[in-house]
Each structure stands twice: as C-alpha cells, then as structure tokens.
Image (cartoon, coloured by chain):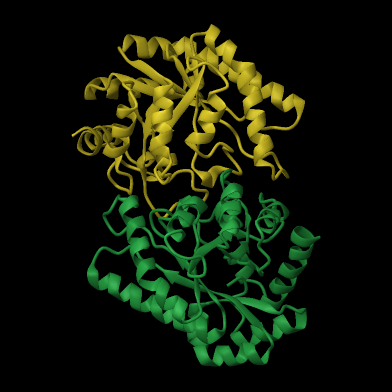
Chain colours: A green, B yellow
Amino acid sequence: MTVKQLSMPELADACGELGITHVGLWREPVQEYGVEATAKLVRDAGLTVTTLCRGGFFTALGPDERAAALADNRRAIDEAAALGTDTLVLVSGGLPPGSRDLGAARERVADALAALAPYAEDHGVRLAIEPLHPMYASDRCVVSTLAQALDLAEGFPAHQVGVAVDTYHVWWDDQAPAQIARAGAAGRIHTFQLADWTTPLPEGVLNGRGQLGDGSVDLREWKGYVEAAGYRGPIEVELFNESLWARPGREVLAETAERFVAHVIR
Amino acid sequence: MTVKQLSMPELADACGELGITHVGLWREPVQEYGVEATAKLVRDAGLTVTTLCRGGFFTALGPDERAAALADNRRAIDEAAALGTDTLVLVSGGLPPGSRDLGAARERVADALAALAPYAEDHGVRLAIEPLHPMYASDRCVVSTLAQALDLAEGFPAHQVGVAVDTYHVWWDDQAPAQIARAGAAGRIHTFQLADWTTPLPEGVLNGRGQLGDGSVDLREWKGYVEAAGYRGPIEVELFNESLWARPGREVLAETAERFVAHVIR
C-alpha cells in the first residue's frame, strides 16, 4: 500500500531491483490483478508475502451484514492461503450507524473471531488483530490499544489469533511496551509494522502516515521492544500518504528502503 | 470558546437571557477584553467562572523557554484568581522540535507542576491537568490518558493538582471509567467537560468537536461515571467547531443549552 501507484508486476520488479524479498499485500490490488495471478507473480519473483491486509469490519448489528462480513473474511483467509502468507491482518470496524456502544461493538469482534479462528487454522492462516489509533475508534476500529487487542486474542490459541503492532497506532501509548512484552511472551506478535507520525493530520486523518524518519516516532526504540519480546519476523512499512502516492512508486520504494536502513536498522 | 464569536458583553448578556449562571473562559478573549474588566463584567452579570483555560505548554527543552512558560503560567494563575475561579486547566504541550522522547517530555511536565503548584495554592487556584486525545500527543499534549494525568497529579495534594475530564479526549478509552473513579476517590476531578466525537475529522484535527448529540459519545454514561465518582461541580461544554463558530453565537449557545438538556441531563 506504501506504493499503491505500482501495478503488481511493477511492484515485483521494483522489489527485485532493490533486493527486497518480502512484501505485504492488500486485498484490493490483489483481487484486481487476480489472486492466483498474484500468487504466481510473487512466487516467480522469489517474493515472500508477509501478510495480507485486511479482514475484519465485524461490528455491524444486522444478521445479514454480519453473515456477509464473516463470508468476506473467509474469502480473505482463502486469499491469504493462496498467496502463501500465514497472516491475515484484521481491522475490527467502527461503531454501527447511530450506536454509541464501544463495549458492545468490541464484543461482536470477539464473536466474529470465534466464528473465524478455526477456519483460519484449517487454512494455515493466523489472524492478527490490529489496534488502530484511538482517532479511528468511531468509524474504523473499536479496538484502540494493544491491551484490548490482546484481551480479544487471548480467547484463542496464539497460532489462531495474535496482534499486529503498528508504530503509527501505538506510539503514543505508554502502556504499549508492556503490552508488546505480553504479546511476545505468548507468541502473539503476528506482524510488526512501521509508519512515522507527522502533523498536521490531513482531513479524514487516513492518509497522513509519515515516511520513516520524518516524524515523532523513535522507530529503533519500538523495534527494540518487539525484538526484546522475541519477535524475529518481517518488519513491514505501511504508509498511507497522498504525497508519497503522488510520486513515482519505484522512487518511493527506494527512498523507503533507504529510510529503513537509516532510521530502523542502522 | 464554544461561542467565541460573541464578545464578552454579548456572552454575559446571552448567558443571562438563557439562564446560564456559570461560564468557562479562555485566556485570550479575557486578555483582549481585559482581566479586570472581565472580572467586573461577569460579577455584575451574576456569572460564576467555572475554570480558566489554559495554562501549560511545559515541554520546551531550553531554559529560557521553560522560564518563560513558568512565568506565563503564574500570570494565568493570577488571572484565574482575579476572575474568581478556583481552577486553571493545563494542557501539557507536545514534543519539542526534533524530539521523539515522550517520556522525557512528560517528566518536564512534572517538573513544571512542582514549580507552580505552591504558587497556585497561594492564590486559591487548583491546577487541572487535561489529558488530550492521543492524536495530539506530538504537537499539543504529551499527556494522553487520564491514567497519565493522575500519575502526574498524585505527586501533589488534591487541592493543588487534579485533572480535567473531557469526553472528547477520553471517550475511546476503556480504562477511563476506572481512572475517573480513581480521580474522584482522591478528590481530583477538578472539572468535567463535554464535547461529542464526530467524523470525518477536519485537517489539523483541532476544530471538529461535535455539538452534543451529533456524535459517538454516550454523554449521559460519562456524566454517570463522574457522578458515581463523587463529582458535583459544574459541567462545561467546550466545542471547537468551525461550523458552530460560523453561526450567530446566541443561536449556538441556545442550541447547546437545549442539547445539554436533551442529551445529558434528561
């Protein structure tokens, strides 16, 4: 999604040129190119798919909407399996229209996980609950903290349900380092994602995630937390940023790789 | 601030017409009209000033900036005393330019409180630390939760330092009800403020606070939490909202009073 201006083949080529061997994919571009075609493309390019984003949106009140959401999440699990990734990232969904009950919405997320976790295991896919920044609590994700995500995940075995740790969403939270330790001890850090926090936030606050190094997040520190918690998996960079999308995708991918070296691993 | 389009005399008149007997004031319009003139105006109008907003912005690194911030906060305490309110609301400030260290910034807030709390007590003024929504953590307020605000406040007696509970900032936080109970048990709820949460958020996310009843916050529920915690003080409505500011102030004040009855106390 960081370089969504690239087509799937362009993405695979650019990764190859830059020596990038792992890539996280989103469902929409995968579906557009075709799930099987994408699976073949990344396989032929020697790319490993780290995660598929995203399932979720479990909070509807009506039975038809809820059944449709579960069916769509089963398709997402199928797609993840077809792409050869073991992890599907879940964004819970926000409050249904007219509702003010965050607690009840969070309970519906738990119900949906119970319906999906065995199906996911049968397909070799782990579910990763991603807490989103509290500014998305009403319209996108009622799970706002790692503590809440882990409370939900702990209803299931770790190989079925864990969490996604994204610096953009948790960097402000002084409880997050302890929750990362809790997640790591239970083997529940299913992915680790980076984005920097920059202001002013754009209208709608969706597409203002900062390029690594441009913002307020001490990325090395957060990498240290997940590593201290035992995480050894891939590190994803997930930037939704209009100004990055407006530039040539290969240039943005190369810049992101350079920033990753300079601000995360050096 | 909800009706900042009204001049001080217009505000006093409108409150009188609507039977509003308490008003929270901000420093800038008070200074513009004059502190003593405002004090006389509200006294003559029979208005009680609930709180003065705001002191704070304690997080600068340089000694000159820090000294200037403390001096400005002493003036804010003087102004609060002159206006006859016992409460000065504090917004901590964000990260200094180039800093990524939220923890150190929070420590500087504690240092500033230690410098100011005795001065405030000498002037009959309590300090109310206001946690702001985590979306302001980098540029406005490194204190993002009631738990953090109380951790800071508990370094001082309750009659010196407490917290401001604002629904806009805490509504997403499943730990907030327990923290309100903690604050109330210690006599540290120094004010209770209402705003609703509406989306999409505007660019910069400052001026999108929703009119009561327009958003996702169960205002009655939050009123119940502070009341159960023993709070019996005034309830302030603090809306920063461009569309409300664009309308006639008396109309907005009357609407706000109606919404307060319909969504909070009925």
Of residue B168 and residue A227, the one placed in the foreground of this image is A227
Relative height, residue A124 to residue A245 (above, below): below
**Residue positioned 70% across, 25% down in the render:** B66
Residue B225: % across, % down: 32, 33
Q: Total number of numbered labels?
A: 0
Q: Quadrant of the C terminus of chain B?
A: top left
Residue B69: % across, % down: 65, 24
**Residue positioned 69% across, 60% down in the render:** A212
Would residue B77 be found to the left or right of residue A212 on screen?
Answer: left
Q: Is residue A237 visible?
A: yes
Of residue B77 and residue A14, the one placed in the foreground of this image is A14
Relative height, residue B150 to residue A67 (above, below): above
Of residue A21 and residue B28, the one placed in the foreground of this image is A21
Residue B139: % across, % down: 60, 42
Query: Residue most toward the top?
Result: B122
**Residue positioned 49% across, 48% down in the render:** B205
Relative height, residue B44 to residue B194 (above, below): above
Query: Residue most toward the left?
Result: B266
Residue B70 picture quarter: top right
Residue A249 picture quarter: bottom right
Residue A90: % across, % down: 46, 67
**Residue positioned 37% across, 59% down in the render:** A94
Q: Is residue B239 visible?
A: no
Would residue A265 be found to the left or right of residue A206 on screen?
Answer: right
Q: Quadrant of the N terminus of chain B?
A: top left
Of residue A235 and residue B26, the one placed in the foreground of this image is A235
